[in-house]
Amino acid sequence: MKIQKYMLWCIIAWLASIQLLQAQQITQIEYWIGDDYGNAVIENINVSADSITIDIPYLFNSNDNEFGDLIYCRFKDDQGKWSTVYSQPMVMKNNENVSTVKLVEYWYDDDFANRVLMPLTDNIVGGALIGQLIDIDALSFPAEKISYRFKGVGNQWSEITTMLLKNLPTEAQYLRFDKIEYWFDNEDFDQRKTIALNNQPDANPIDMILYNDDIDWNDGAAIVYYRLVNEATHEETMVHSYNTHAIPDDNNSITKVEYWYNNDFNNRQTKMVTMFEPLYIDIEEFTPQLNTDTILNIRYLDNLGNWSVILSNHIRDLEINPVTAVDPEVYDFGDVIITETLQQQFTLTNNGTTTITITDFILNGTNSMEFSHDGVNNTEVAPNGGTYQFMVTFAPTTLGDKTTNLIIENDTITNAIVLSGKGVLPPPTVVVDNQCGQSVLTANDYIGDLTWSTGEGTASITVNMAGTYSVTQTVNGITSSPAIVMVSPKEIPDAPMVTVDNQIGKSVLTASNYSGTLSWSTGESTASITVTQAGIYTITQTVDGCVSPEGSGLAEPASPPVPVIMVSNECGQSVLTASNYSGTLSWSTGESTTSITVNMAGTYSVTQTINGVTSSPAIAIASPKEIPDAPMVTVDNQIGQSILTASNYSGTLSWNTGESTASITVMVAGTYSVTQTVDGCTSVEASAVAAPNTPGLIQVTVDDLCGYSVLTASNYSGTLSWSTGESTASITVNISGTYSVTQ
């Protein structure tokens, strides 16, 4: 168990009340219980304030000293000197009648070794209710009395209460009591006083006594006795007692102070005082001896006749109306980066009536090497408020808290300044690179582990939000102050908007909602572009070096109309003619004219191209008419004539003589040809040579008569034909000349 945080409050509070010198710093505490100094405990502490509260482990290891009621302690300062021994009661107020009681321990008669420990699950308080917890009828041995004590959440035992078993009230009996009788140790029992319970069965009797405004506590009583009484039945409980020294401080007043030096208790001096706590006594009135090694001992008497524990201190640690004063007496330089320095000016004031001489400035303490001053020894300071100013410099070389004392000695008194500070790491330096949409923060000039305000620990971090960011470095558990920077990432511009105007053979894409420089996926930078190919086209804008996301538009140029093909199937060929077009034609034959002539049956197509966009093809089937074969011609040459006959034909014949019969007769030798026409198509010519056989030579006799001549043919067998056109055997002519005849 522990004695919870109570001991040093009284001790240090008293030291503060007699104005402990601020320069003194407590470094160790030694404490023990009762006379058990052999088991004293020493702990390191660091206290320069007026008071301290610490937890002290409970030191009881056996039943023999479990009821020790005094704790002793002493302190060691930073100059290696121990204080005198302080003592005070272990328990300042013993009262089980509180709501924090958690355990009760009881035993019969004097059999403490066989005591019973019982936890309290209900909020049962009050010594008179012990009867609820114990079944007296179940005892298997004779007993006359019961003793008990309580323990609360603070792990402190109450004082021991002993009652006769026959007077132990049960809860029901307790409710029958209607008054409290009490008296003091300097009064007779016959002078006891009464407090009515007035139907307050749960009232705490001792509290009703201690907090009764009608009771005069100036009679010096140390012990109050009380019992519960039923006035009608004359039933009464065993008498309880209470040490009035445990009455709360607000009911105490100090009436007298005794003080003495060193161990000269017999020559102690007395000073009567009239005051209520808190107690502040001007030590100057004690006319102390000024030897700095002298120990001043003090105790006080309150209005209840109780002496306090003895409190003591060295005269050197008391400020007794000093002739000189230094301002400030305590100074904390705060956080100072190692390798840097911080200065503070101090002023020493001479409040005396004669000139004083500063004899020495002394820095002492663990970290004195990290402090310096510019005070000059043998400096005189004028009286009646004369001042001397000097600077103290804190230049930490290592990390952590630093403390030291600056002692200023003069020929009259010594002053002291409590100095402190903390050597801290320098914050890292930070380089900010504000980029597009992000900022890169890079820490430099650090030796420890980094911690960014984002939680990251890398040398560089990337953030995309504008704002304040910080970074610290930590070495051996010590963290620097933060380096703080503002970041403003460059804003990434919005993507431009794109509108598309799809036309025949082209699309016009136009950007809007932009303020920077444009860049199309085609490489162009104008506000509008014209494309002839279908597809997705993108665009970005650049502002202050930052490129926006892509805006895009889908170009779908309208296709040109499909041309119309007219087909004219002719003999041995087809003529295909395009119409309904305005662009450039492209036939499947490779030609680009409006009309093409083909002699092969088949499928032919044509497209038109406008602005680089080609229409779907127009398709047509060509079927040229077939040209028939040339007829075959046979020739029958006879005398004076030839008969030509056509064969192997199915159409209409056409001879070059104009005849259309299958056979023709010619009398003139020569080449004769014939064609046939089928479905309007004329074959190539078939030809043959006619060579009629020639008859014998006709004999002509001429009989020239007067005025005319008679020509007569002979030696012929065929039909004659004169050059005059006549066909008779003889002809008469009246014109001279040459005449011929054939048969």
Image (cartoon, helix red, strand yellow):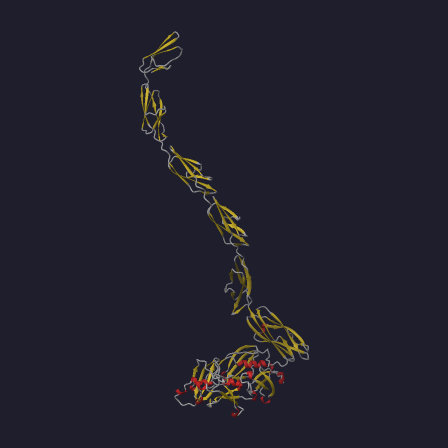
Q: Can residue 298 be seen in this view?
A: no
> Which image quarter holds the C terminus?
top left
Which residue is rendered at x = 43% and y = 41% of the image? 562
Task: State left or right for residue 569 relative to residue 221.
Answer: left
Residue 417 found in image quarter: bottom right
Q: Can residue 8 be seen in this view?
A: yes
Q: Where is 406 relative to 587, above or below? A: below
- Out of 599 and 317, give the one closest to the viewer: 599
- Out of 583 and 689, give the one closest to the viewer: 583
In the rendered image, the residue lying farthest to the top is 706
Residue 173 found in image quarter: bottom left
Number of disc labels = 0
Name the spot of residue 542 as percent of width and height, x first: 53, 53
Task: State left or right for residue 731 relative to residue 342.
Answer: left
Name the spot of residue 317 as percent of width and height, x first: 59, 81
Name the spot of residue 266 as percent of width and height, x first: 58, 90
Q: Where is 186 relative to 539, above or below? A: below
Task: State left or right for residue 270 relative to residue 563.
Answer: right
Q: Where is 267 relative to 643, above or below? A: below
Name the spot of residue 664 as percent of width and height, x first: 33, 23
